[in-house]
Amino acid sequence: MGLFQRIFVQQILLTGGVLALATGAYAQPASPGDIFGFEPGDDYKLASYEQMETYYRQLAAQSDRVLLREIGKSALGRNLYLLTISSRANLENLERYRSISEQLARARIDDDTAVSLANEGKAVVWIDGGLHATELAHGQMTPLLAHRVATEESAEMAAIRDNVIFLLMPMMNPDGLEIVRKWYESQLGSAFETTNPPELYHHYVGHDNNRDFFMNNMPESKAVARVVYNEWYPQIVYNQHQISPPYARIVIPPYSDPVNPKIHPGVTTGLNEIGSAMGNRFALKKMPGAISDVGFSMWWNGGMRTVPYFHNMIGILTETGHSSPTPAFYDPKLFPQMLQVRANARAAGVVVDEESSGVPDARVLYPYPWQGGESHFSEPVRYMITGSVAVLRAASDSRVKWLTNIHHMGRDAIAAGASGTRFYLIPTDQRHPDEAGNLVNILLEGGIEIARASESFRVGDGRYTEGTYIVSAAQAFRPYVIDLLEKQDYPDTRVDPSGVNKPPYDIAGWTLPMQMGVTVDAISEDLSVDSEPVQELVAPVAGQVRGNARFGYALSHASNASIKAVNRLLRDGATVHWTNESLRAGRETYDVGTFVIENNGGALDANVSGLASELGLDFTGLSSRPDADMSTLHLPRVGLYKSYVAAMDEGWTRWLLEDYGFDPVSLSDEDMQTGDLSELHAIVLAHPDASAQFADNIDKILTGHPPGTMPEQYTGGLGLQGALALQQFAKAGGTVVTFGSAADFAIRQFGLPVRNVVAGASQEVFLIPGSLIRANVDTGKPLAYGMESEVAVSFVRSAAFAVRGQAGCIDDLLNLRYCTEITRGGRPLEPKPEAQMFDSVVNYASDELLMSGWALGTEHIREKSAMAVVPHGAGEVVLFGFRPQFRGQPRGTYKLIFNALHAATIEE
Ligand SMILES: [Zn+2]
């Protein structure tokens, strides 16, 4: 059944553990300390990934309870490993237990079979470490956890090994471990020992590596999804983190409201039960400080903890305190300030005993408060091992229940799909067939069952071609299907309508067909069509190359894949134009913006047919030069500002531009201040990370790390010198492109005649904390070529622009009136026409702005500019108010970025 079963069987044969099983000869397995030369958790000590790899190989070779597999490669090419730990008897029968887990999770079996399989099967538990690399203890803890579960001879551990198949991914982000370890060791003994490195700790996405678990853009996410959702179907998934409130030691379930209504309540209650088991173990082991309900909600999909919810799996995250190998003292007198309790009391005029301890009293969800004091690195290691053993024990104690539960939840999901929307159809003959294929693959990677029509068919008024993808709503992972394909409706929790709604833990809405520009039809009728299950990830259907190409080829601008093709052709030296008007050639009509590739002989025909088949693009021959205005494009030379205040949006942008063949050059502060920028066509400023409020972020670009907070070469930011150089670049004819709040930087530093109309708005009046917003695109403008006229844009506390006019008055959101009048000799001067100052390419819609998520105050951005081009000297600044490539998700707005970069190469 599993998509990747073949790979699984091959890989398991490669491991040392299997060889060892055959020989039966074992020494007592070495401990991590034997290999590392220190104990994980010792002060100031970090094991390298190489040491860990050595340790895991040795453990697998020396223990008949441990198998080691490579499950993929990291972004920088390191091996990703999975350890499977269980009793020897279980490991000898592993494929049987995997199959039972799959059959119960997919719930295509009757209840009697399920009961019998649940009794025969083993609970499957996934635990990982090392995802967020600056949270150092979990990645260091996993070697000890592996050793302990494999070797401890207690009755409890023996029962765990008998009842549980334990999947341990000991290091989710090995590249990040090495970045952070090297930084820590280089700073050890300095004032900056506990600082974070001045670069992302995942090569592309930094902390967002835990925001990628439905898109699976990154190779690490793909590797995890293959094991979890296509192979092993663990009933429990436990993901380790380390951002605890400083007055507590570890955050455990239950989590916080809101709960996404698509999640089966069996998940929520099962999770709470395991949280109780964890809290109970901490209490009885005399380990204080386990706290629940501190803001991690159950709304969002896309994290390592939360994607399992939509697969009827129990997803656990813990956040354990003290993430550094450097010891620290946690002063209990400061706890109330951290809690804001004392500060609030003081503000309310209550007399506060400033000398008293601030340790909070016991509460239902914080029953055993921590008293504070000195903390060492061994402490989070011990807490995480105890938490992990608590989870394994809960799985072991109730093995049959967890196996039965996942079947029941899957069965309920299948039953729920018998009414309402019964199928989602994804046609292949749509505007963005490339993204339709990507959506199918995203669902497949998430374990969704998909079929492909073997014939054309009709349903309702619709006609569908052979090859149409069919996603049944009646499947075990139905919550995942409907959560990704339907709109989100984030709850309004305000008791008082003038108050502030509880903002989402992450974002409020993410509906994929909207973001990706893919047509998905929801069908409530019965469907009668021959179909085949899709067994492998889909590749584009080869496109066609037609007609007489004496002059060249026409290529539609509609798909993202067309941009990849154009960049490859430009790199190979082809002459490529886009048309500035629609065009007729032969019997065909081409939209404005169509690419025209001149046939200058050489390898062009071969290149074109290669691109047609690889990328699924149609090329049409042009026998003569089109009778239309055209602009000639060049391969853009793109600079991407890379701050020492590492920004995830910069990393995502770098990933995107590399993927589409723009090959951006990273520009440091020094490059911007003293380098020669004149060879570049465009410089991109990504959204700086990410304090909640827009205006705070400008400083991160301009002033960077404050002096004294980092080694000197990483402080100071772009500075006035860099800002001026950037402005000169634009004035001399370059294009500056800004995402998110980088727009505020450009507006202020360059003095652009533009306002962000929602800057500084209070959250009672205006709040769109991560939602999809309807916008209209002026598709006649070059920067909008190939776009649809209406798109969903990703609005994450984003911006809306209006021209700051030379004359007249505008009332803004805070009821501040901006008035300007320009006079000469006492008489008003004729203002420059707005059109010469500000060209809006995308505007927020006039009606029904919220498409998915939650939004308050949409009237304040209605019809305002969402993307504007502002001339500046001989060049221009392209301001994106929304996030056109946020986390690699809104693929329907990618082309706006690509067009801005291509347009920057056009010589007037
Ligand atoms: Zn984390």
Image (tube, rainbow, N blue to C red):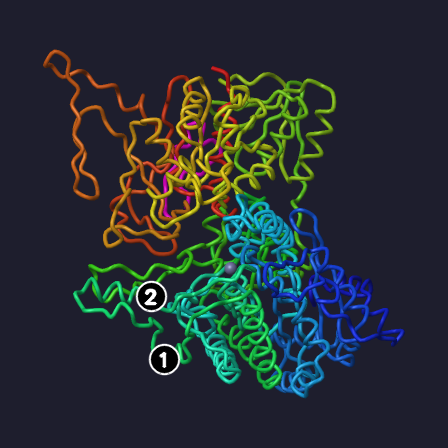
Q: Nearer the viewer, residue 302 or 159?
A: 159
Q: Distance between the residues labelled 1 and 2?
A: 14 Å
Q: Which of 860 and 129 is in front in this view?
A: 129
Q: In percent of the image, x 52 and y 46: which residue is there? A: 888
Q: Which of 895 and 464 is in front in this view?
A: 895
Residue 854 position by quadrant = bottom left
Task: Report the label total.
Answer: 2
Q: Which mark is residue 339?
A: 2
Quick one: label 1, few (<14), some, or many (20+) residues within 10 Å? few
Q: Could you tell me the amino acid type at mark 1?
A: Ala
What element does badge 1 sit on? loop
Which residue position holds label 1?
362
What element does badge 2 sit on? helix
Q: Indicate the position of residue 891 as horizontal and vertical percent values.
A: 50, 44
Q: In the picture provided, is 765 more to the left or to the right than 518?
A: left
The residue stretch that appears in magenta? 773-792
Q: Going from the N terminus, do you reach mark 1 or mark 2 first? A: 2
